[in-house]
């Protein structure tokens, strides 16, 4: 994995709670045996009209939010299915960070495993961020993982929580697999004492 | 202070607990299917690794497969299934193939085969792995990266969730089922009420439930946002397990039983949170919205925007009702349905089909309704056929299908059309879950059967009196 650095980018507001992984990537896009090609299906039911053309009403189709690398959602973002395809889809669509009030557990874990940074913030702060990026879609948010803050252009700083271990993995670009394989001895010992 | 059941199982599986790092948790059984495993196997191949414990890994095919006889499979489903076959062959993993006698929805087949046992840790690249908690195991869904981790190391790195007691008391009325209990729990606590927690369902009402019913409840723990849901094992659990292919036998059985007796929450244990439900007056439940928390009694009405507490809830309800084409304040009863789906890992077991068949027997599916029954596994299908349930359903006008996920997630060709109302025994009413534009109304098998013959939502209790 690429080590995570600072992200400074525009952000798109997704004013909905309980955005589930079936919305992020509908089941009919899960037919691949690789990770590729998920970006097309990202928010498919909201992005496309039934005739296949882009839905101009949907926020991610609006010109001003093209190229946003930060998505700002509400409560219980990523609920539902465990499909990691949802994370792959968001990343292939161009997102590096998802800020939300709360996240569903499995989505949160899946995001970290792929270096898509999930940032939980208080509801009031989410409301503020939504207003700011709606008023001026050019607004760039600065996300600094090292110091665990999201900085708005007016200087507002909002700190966020992340487990120290997870943070270190992201900053150093480490994944769990290497860590787990290095535990071979402990795993074998466990198996011996539990069989 | 005593320990909860969840804490005991957790403690029994800690391989390492270094400060500043997540716990390394040993996984006893790993279930896989065709949709969320291919990328994980690819990762294993890339890194030139082996599957560490093929004997603890069990695969079946359920999500993408067709459930009707079709001469030619869609290319992508065939590709996923063949990839799974190849992976299982190359890495020595047991596969319950659609070509064999044992196959079905992963969360239906594993318990049937006796793989699911009390005290185990069980994972699967599927959020409804919580189903297996019905046996007093700690079972949860994982993403594809983690599927790879378990394949390679038989372990996961996990932060310990908190505990959440769900106490259920009271006698269920006629026509009110386990599905109604869990829908009521989720309606009360919301779709994210359990985030970061493991539910333990407790109380007399739970203890009286059969294994099939317990599985229905644990299955939908994830719809309440919980990481997992479990129920302490008891005689009902042991009775179900005895003699199943992968269950211990002989001396091993006695040894296992001795260990299983320890699997209960201590009297002086404390839960981080708790919730109580008295089911004495519980009515059959139906959802009206686009997340599983948006449900209420069939005797009730669709909520009004002004009943909502926050502006965001008002907006979410407005969006949901707009999508669902329902009017605030309209009675749930009398809402027309177009399709009836009886199936899914929530409600496709023999008991579910028997219950639905009782309502359907001698009746006809309403003219405008398309109805299908999709048994959870080949074994259930065969058992139902031996009882003549298939004829009860087909004579009434239902389609009788092969086993799989089918219209629960609409990956195969079982899709509800845009705008169609689906009375469904599955677990998710998300927008488009059962086909682009489809509108799901979640309910019990009894209620779905009643909707099929009535053509609309009705209170099934009136048909049972
Ligand atoms: S039946 Fe539905 S919920 Fe269950 S495993 Fe299949 S797709 Fe998932």
Image (cartoon, grey):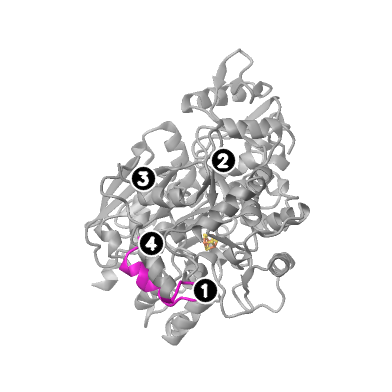
Marks 2 and 4 sit apart, C-alpha to C-alpha, by: 34 Å
Residue A58 is situated, as x and y percent measured from the top left of the image, at 63, 39
> Which residues, given as a range, are shown in magenta?
B233-250
Give yes or no for residue B242 being in the magenta stretch.
yes
Q: Going from the N terminus, do you reach mark 3 or mark 4 first? A: 3
Secondary element at image label 1: loop
Residue named by callout 1 = B377
Q: Considering only vertical position in the picture, is B319 above or below B296?
A: above
Q: In which quarter of the image is the C terminus of chain B?
A: bottom left
**Residue B416 visible, this orientation:** yes
Marks 1 and 2 sit apart, C-alpha to C-alpha, by: 32 Å
Rendered residue at 60%/50% (across/down): B143
Nearer the observer: mark 1 or 4; the answer is 4
Marks 1 and 4 sit apart, C-alpha to C-alpha, by: 30 Å
**Residue A48 visible, this orientation:** no
Q: Which mark is residue A108?
A: 2
Residue named by callout 4 = B259
Cβ of mark 1 under 8 Å from ligand 1: the answer is: no
Outermost residue on the top side: it is: A155
Q: Which mark is residue B164?
A: 3
Nearer the observer: mark 1 or 3; the answer is 3
Residue A43 is situated, as x and y percent measured from the top left of the image, at 64, 45
- The chain to which mark 1 is attached is B
Marks 3 and 4 sit apart, C-alpha to C-alpha, by: 24 Å
Tell me the quarter of the picture where residue B249 sits: bottom left
Circles 2 and 3: CB distance less than 8 Å?
no
Give yes or no for residue B249 being in the magenta stretch.
yes
Count neighbours of disc 4 (C-alpha within 10 A) and say few if under 14, some if 14 to 19, many if 20 or more.
few
Viewer-side residue, A23 vs A163 = A163
Q: Residue B225 carries which label?
A: none
Nearer the observer: mark 3 or 4; the answer is 4
Residue B343 is situated, as x and y percent measured from the top left of the image, at 48, 68
């Amino acid at each position: 994995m690429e080590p995570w650095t600072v992200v400074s980018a525009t952000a798109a507001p997704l004013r909905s709670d309980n955005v589930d992984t079936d919305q992020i990537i509908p089941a009919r896009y899960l037919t691949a045996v690789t990770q590729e090609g998920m970006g097309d299906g990202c928010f498919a039911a909201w992005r496309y009209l039934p005739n296949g053309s882009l839905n101009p009403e949907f926020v991610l189709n609006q010109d001003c939010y093209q190229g946003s690398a930060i998505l700002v959602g509400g409560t219980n973002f990523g609920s539902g299915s465990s499909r990691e395809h949802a994370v792959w889809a968001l990343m292939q669509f161009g997102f590096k960070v998802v800020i939300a009030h709360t996240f569903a557990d499995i989505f949160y874990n899946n995001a970290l495993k792929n270096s898509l940074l999930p940032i939980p913030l208080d509801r009031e702060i989410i409301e503020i961020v939504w207003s700011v990026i709606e008023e001026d879609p050019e607004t760039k948010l600065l996300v600094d993982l090292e110091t665990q803050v999201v900085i708005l252009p007016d200087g507002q700083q909002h700190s966020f929580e992340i487990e120290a271990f997870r943070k270190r993995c992201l900053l150093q670009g480490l994944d769990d697999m290497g860590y787990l394989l290095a535990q071979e001895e402990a795993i074998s010992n466990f198996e011996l004492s539990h069989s | 202070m005593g320990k909860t059941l969840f804490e005991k199982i957790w403690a029994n599986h800690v391989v390492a607990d270094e400060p500043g790092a997540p716990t390394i948790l040993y996984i006893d059984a790993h279930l896989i299917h065709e949709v969320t495993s291919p990328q994980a196997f690819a990762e294993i191949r890339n890194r030139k690794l082996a599957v560490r414990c093929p004997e603890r890994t069990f695969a079946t095919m359920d999500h993408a497969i067709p459930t009707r006889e079709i001469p030619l499979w869609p290319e992508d489903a065939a590709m996923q299934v063949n990839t799974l076959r190849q992976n299982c062959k190359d890495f020595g993993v047991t596969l319950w193939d659609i070509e064999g006698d044992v196959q079905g929805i992963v969360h239906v087949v594993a318990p049937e085969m006796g793989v699911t046992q009390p005290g185990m840790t069980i994972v699967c690249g599927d959020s409804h792995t919580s189903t297996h908690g019905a046996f007093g195991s700690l079972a949860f869904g994982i993403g594809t990266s983690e599927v790879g981790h378990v394949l390679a190391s038989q372990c996961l790195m996990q932060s310990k969730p908190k505990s959440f007691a769900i106490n259920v008391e009271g006698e269920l009325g006629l026509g009110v089922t386990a599905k109604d209990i869990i829908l009521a729990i989720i309606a009360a606590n919301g779709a994210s009420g359990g985030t970061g927690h493991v539910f333990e369902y407790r109380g007399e009402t739970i203890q009286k439930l059969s294994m099939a019913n317990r599985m229905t409840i644990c299955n939908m723990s994830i719809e309440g946002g919980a990481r997992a849901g479990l129920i302490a094992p008891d005689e009902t659990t042991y009775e179900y397990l005895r003699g199943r292919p992968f269950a211990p036998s002989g001396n091993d059985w006695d040894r296992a039983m001795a260990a299983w007796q320890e699997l209960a929450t201590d009297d002086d244990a404390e839960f981080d949170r708790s919730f109580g439900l008295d089911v004495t007056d519980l009515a059959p439940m139906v959802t009206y919205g686009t997340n599983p928390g948006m449900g209420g009694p069939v005797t009730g009405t669709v909520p009004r925007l002004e009943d909502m507490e926050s502006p965001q809830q008002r907006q979410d309800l407005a969006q949901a009702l707009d999508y669902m084409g329902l009017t605030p304040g309209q009675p749930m009863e009398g809402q027309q349905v177009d399709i009836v789906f009886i199936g899914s890992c929530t409600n496709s077991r023999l008991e579910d089909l028997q219950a639905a068949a009782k309502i359907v027997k001698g009746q006809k599916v309403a003219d405008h309704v398309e109805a299908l029954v999709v048994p959870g596994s080949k074994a259930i299908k065969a058992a139902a056929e031996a009882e003549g349930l298939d004829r009860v359903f087909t004579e009434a006008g239902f389609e009788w299908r092969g086993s799989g996920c089918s219209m629960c997630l609409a990956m195969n060709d079982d899709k509800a059309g845009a705008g169609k109302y689906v009375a469904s025994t599955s677990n998710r009413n998300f927008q488009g879950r059962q086909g682009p534009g489809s509108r799901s109304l979640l309910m019990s098998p009894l209620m779905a059967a009643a909707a099929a013959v009535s053509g609309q939502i009705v209170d099934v209790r009136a048909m049972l009196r």
